[in-house]
Image: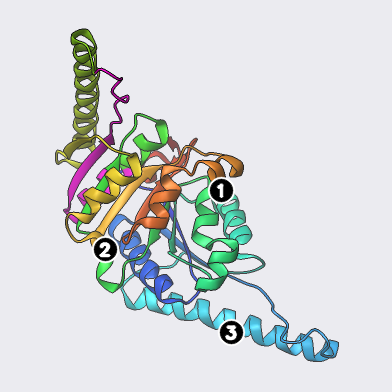
Amino acid sequence: MNIFPAKILLATDGSEDAALATRAAADLSSTTGSELYVVHAWQFMAPYSAYPSEMLKDFRRLNEQEAQELVTRQVARIEDMGGNVTGALLRQGPPIDEILSLTRELHPGLVVIGSRGLGSVGSLLVGSVSEGVVHHAPCPVLIVRGGQKAWPPQRIVIGDDSSDPATKAGELGAVLAKLFGTGTILVRAYEPPPEPIGGWGGQDRIKLDEARLQKERALEMRARALEAIGESRPESRLIETDPTLALLLVAEEKEEEKTIIAVGSRGLGAAKRLMLGSVSTKVLRAARGPVLICPPGNQTKSKDEGGGEVD
């Protein structure tokens, strides 16, 4: 497993989704021998700002004590699962900021997080913690959700578009498939140009067929490359539809909650994400099961290369 990350950072908030993410992170760490770090970020929320300062200090100490107890419980839970925690970290501040700050300090190769770190109303207003982390993390992020039966995964669906992030998502997805003995489906969306009025001419149809054949060949080449990593040949699918829909349709075919969708992120800025929406963001919002997202410019450190980078 020489391309699996040497360090895993588990971000937890004590929620049901976080409990599932804890199980997944502990499983991955135990199976691969990766170091596991646990972080919980807490914020002091004064119940009433007009309280005397000494009373506010008491509330703050109580909040911090509860946060520390949460981290202690998470570590104990991981140890009960047979896992080992390299470091347990308590940070004060906005969860997204603190998690991202730790990725720059620890340089993990993978962040594992539950689907949401806020209540449903909060996530609608300001966006979920997981989405905020995904948009800015320098390393792959595994968002674990789908209920207690979602882990371990039963299938890996990999989105491919020839980009560097998609290539990395495919490689990490192939490793996960090998770890858990699951089937892998490599998906590439193909959107042919709209047919002109009067239909396609003979030469145009030949060119369209050639373009499709080139995409099929490129997909088969990617499948062979992933077979060398995962030691099993992924099933290849070239689907004529929108990329997000293609991935979701394949995931829905069988036990969607137990299917990891692995995609690359093109790293669009906030304005473009709002106007156009990236495939990775759409998948993250719509998928019922776990989602693995790899960012552009990812530098995953390998255990077998003494901390060297894996391309």
Q: Disc 3 marks which amino acid?
A: Glu
Along the horizontal axis of the image, is 128 left or right of 144?
A: right
Amino acid under disc 1? His
Q: Position of residue 199 (x, y in %)?
A: 23, 18
Quarter assignment of residue 50:
bottom right
Residue at point 47%, 67% (across, down): 116
Residue type pointed to by label 2? Glu
Q: What percent of the width, then of the height, locates residue 171? A: 31, 40
- Please report the bounds of the magenta region as a residue range: 172-198
- Residue occupied by mark 1: 136
Q: Secondary structure at mark 1?
A: helix
Residue 36 in view of the camera = yes
Q: Is residue 120 magenta?
A: no
**Residue in the picture at 64% in, 65% down:** 94
First in sequence, mark 3 or 1: give its number: 3
In the picture of the structure, the residue carrying the numbered disc 3 is 66
Q: Are marks 3 and 1 in contact (CB under 8 Å)?
A: no
Circle nearer the viewer, 3 or 1: 1
Q: Residue at x 41, y 48 (%)?
A: 293
Counting residues from the N terminus, which is met first, the one under dot 2 or under dot 1? 1
Q: Which residue is mark 2?
A: 257
